[in-house]
Amino acid sequence: MNENNKTQQTTKEDDGSLSFLAIPQDEANKHFNCRETTQQKLINLTFWVCDFIDGVKTKFGAERFLVKIKRNRDDKDSEAEKFFTNSSEIKYVLREIKKRNAFPRRVTMRASGTRYYFE
């Protein structure tokens, strides 16, 4: 097999779709188009944290985090869920995961009174 045949086999033809361009998500204008859940419903459950948006203003206050999760690592994005948090422990862990570029990460939601945290 010559070099030209290898190139033709690995290069997909532009089908005119947006998906062909593989444009990355705009980090400054991120959103999660998925079903919303609550921290309380996630207590003692293990799931995958995929991403988060910080500094979200809600009716409960400013500087909340919106967290995108999947029950199974390989679930489709359409099966993802999101929840809001103001937990300082969860915010800290999410920032540290982001610093390490280590998403997705498997966690278990725990609670002690009104305090929520990841294990």
Image: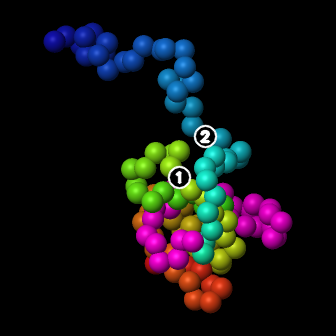
List x then y, in percent, for residue 50.
Answer: 51, 56
Residue matched to label 1: 80
Q: What amino acid is labelled 1 in the image?
A: Ala
Quarter of the picture containing the N terminus is top left
Question: How far across and how far down the image is residue 95, in percent?
Answer: 59, 67
111 to the left or right of 63 = left
- Magenta stretch mostly in which secondary structure? strand
Q: Nearer the viewer, residue 119 or 10?
A: 119
Q: Which residues are magenta?
A: 41-65
- Measured from the top left, where is residue 87 in percent x and y? 65, 77
Name the kind of residue labelled 2 in the image. Gln
- 26, 83: nearer the viewer: 83
User: Which residue appears at 61% of the width and 63% of the height?
Assistant: 37
Name of the residue lying farthest toward the bottom: 113
Residue 79 position, x and y percent, is 50, 49
**Mark 2 element type:** loop
Q: Earlier in the sequence, mark 2 or mark 1?
A: 2
**Magenta-colored stretch includes residue 111:** no
Q: Is residue 5 left or right of residue 64?
A: left
**Residue 18 vertical position relative to residue 38 in the rendered view, above or below:** above
- Neighbour tally class for label 1: few under 14, some 14-19, many 20 plus, Cα within 10 Å: many
51 inside magenta stretch: yes
> Alpha-carbon distance for marks 2 and 1?
17 Å
The residue tagged 2 is 25
x 32%, y 20%: residue: 10
- Residue 16 picture quarter: top right
Name the secondary structure under disc 1: loop
Quadrant of res 89: bottom right
